[in-house]
């Protein structure tokens, strides 16, 4: 912005300076020309008294030499004699015809001669004739002082432009400083600093002060909305504690067995998740005694654990299931809790939105820069796969919040990966999760991996 203001001021000042200085320079040139011709008239008039008194050549030579132009050899006097001839005193540069024309007409004249101009002025002499005074005006006299004047005018124009640049820079500093403070505050707010505010300087332009006030009001409103959202999330999560308590007591009375143990484990995990939501929503995550969750995990281990968890329910509902590619470790830059939540969302959708007995499969593929997880089923599929990835779509009809696939999408995008929904080889829906582990050298890597047919191995519980 400062450079734009400087360019505008330079352009405007230059145009104004040229509008005044060019006519002024032309006027200086015309003034020098007029001054040269006026000087010639003055030199010729200086010889008028001498010619009126005498026509003696010696006396006229002394009179010519006494003048400034005569000393420089720029004056000639053409004196008439008793005959038709003219006697010339000094160096003549014009022709006899021009001299006789001036003498006959009795009017001054200016004619072009080599190297300049000649000014001819008739003067009456005492003998009754007409003498002609010739004054030579060289070309240098016509432009005397013009170059100096143009140089001075150019320097004045440059000084004016420089002053305008300095003034524009000072004015731009005020505007740019305010704009930079506003931009810096906007970047800080975008980075998560909700306490940032824009100081309203008195020297800022009114428009930028209004923008700063609007930004501060927006930041205050964002803080209020975030606080209200956190309290709402905490309150809603807190309401789950009562049914969780009843569920935990009922699970404790189930006795022994795999199903009972899994139920109690699920209830305990659900209670921990609810507590985590309450603490996080109210900004007290630092007070938790739990060990910080690492930002990486073994995807194969998490997948085996979650598939084993859902396999019990799959056997109860007579669902055929398969797991492939989870034998070798596959490190991904995602916490085990987040990846487990994403898998639970996908597998939970399979159990909620497909009939009992519908088969499903989980495949794990390893690429050079990513780990790809495919969750497919033999259900009816999703009619609009693009809309299914939008938050709150609720493709499953009744009982669907539309947040499951959004959770999966956020987990994938946190690594720089992506999620795609399509038709599976089983005939139903296939959700493809790409977890990026390194810089992506080839955008088609995931496509090639998807086309491989893995060897399916049934998980042994």
Image (spheres, rainbow, N blue to C red):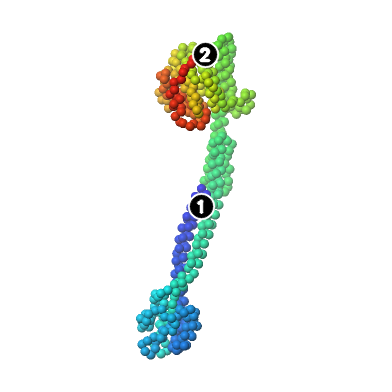
Residue 352 seen in the figure: no
Residue 385: give x, y in percent of width and height: 42, 25
Residue plotted at (44% across, 17% down): 354
Work out whether 410 lies above or below 178: above
Residue plotted at (52% across, 28% down): 437
Residue 261 seen in the figure: yes
**Spatial CA span between label 2 and label 1:** 76 Å
Judge left or right: residue 215 versus residue 394. right
Work out whether 127 lies above or below 429: below
Residue plotted at (56% across, 19% down): 270
Q: Which residue is mark 2?
A: 460
The circle drawn on residue 115 is none
Residue 199 sits in which quadrant?
top right
- For label 1, the crowd category at 10 Å Cα-Cα, with few meaning under 14, some 14 to 19 and many 20 or more, is many
Residue sitting nearer the eye, 19 or 449: 449
Residue 132 sits in which quadrant?
bottom left
The circle drawn on residue 6 is 1
Work out whether 217 lies above or below 244: below
* Circle nearer the N terminus (2, 1): 1
Residue 365: give x, y in percent of width and height: 48, 23
């Amino acid at each position: 912005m400062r450079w734009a203001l400087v360019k505008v001021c330079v352009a405007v000042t230059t145009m104004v300076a040229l509008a005044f200085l060019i006519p002024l320079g032309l006027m200086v040139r015309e003034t020098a020309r007029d001054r040269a011709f006026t000087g010639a008239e003055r030199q010729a008039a200086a010889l008028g008294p001498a010619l009126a008194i005498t026509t003696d050549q010696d006396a006229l030579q002394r009179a010519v030499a006494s003048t400034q132009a005569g000393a420089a050899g720029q004056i000639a006097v053409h004196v008439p004699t008793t005959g038709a001839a003219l006697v010339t005193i000094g160096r003549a540069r014009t022709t006899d015809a021009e001299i006789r024309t001036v003498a006959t007409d009795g009017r001054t004249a200016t004619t072009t001669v080599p190297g300049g101009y000649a000014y001819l002025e008739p003067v009456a002499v005492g003998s009754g004739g007409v003498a002609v005074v010739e004054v030579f005006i060289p070309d240098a006299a016509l432009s005397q002082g013009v170059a100096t004047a143009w140089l001075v005018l150019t320097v004045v124009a440059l000084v004016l432009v420089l002053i305008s640049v300095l003034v524009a820079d000072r004015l731009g500093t005020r505007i740019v400083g305010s704009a930079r403070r506003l931009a810096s505050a906007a970047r800080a707010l975008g980075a998560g600093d909700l306490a940032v505010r824009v100081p309203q300087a008195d020297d800022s332009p009114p428009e930028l002060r209004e923008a700063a006030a609007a930004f501060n009001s927006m930041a205050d409103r964002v803080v209020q909305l975030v606080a209200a959202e956190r309290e709402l999330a905490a309150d809603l999560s807190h309401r789950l504690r009562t049914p969780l308590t009843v569920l935990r007591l009922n699970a404790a009375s189930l006795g022994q067995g795999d199903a009972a143990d899994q139920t109690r484990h699920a209830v305990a995990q659900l209670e921990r998740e609810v507590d985590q939501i309450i603490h996080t929503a109210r900004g007290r995550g630092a007070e938790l005694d739990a060990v910080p969750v690492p930002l990486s995990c073994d995807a194969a281990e998490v997948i085996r654990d979650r598939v084993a968890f859902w396999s019990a329910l799959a056997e109860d509902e007579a669902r055929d299931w398969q797991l492939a590619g989870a034998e070798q470790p596959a490190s991904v830059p995602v916490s085990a809790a987040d990846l487990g939540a994403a898998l639970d969302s996908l597998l939970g959708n399979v159990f909620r939105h497909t009939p009992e007995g519908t088969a499903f499969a989980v495949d794990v593929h390893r690429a050079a820069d990513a780990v790809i997880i495919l969750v497919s089923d033999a259900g009816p599929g999703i009619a609009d796969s693009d809309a299914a990835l939008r938050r709150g779509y609720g493709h499953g009809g009744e009982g669907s919040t539309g947040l499951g696939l959004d959770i999966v999408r956020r987990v994938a995008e946190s690594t720089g990966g992506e999620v795609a929904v399509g038709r599976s080889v089983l005939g139903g829906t296939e959700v493809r999760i790409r977890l990026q582990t390194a810089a992506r050298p080839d955008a088609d890597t995931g496509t090639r991996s998807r086309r491989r047919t893995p060897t399916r191995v049934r998980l042994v519980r």
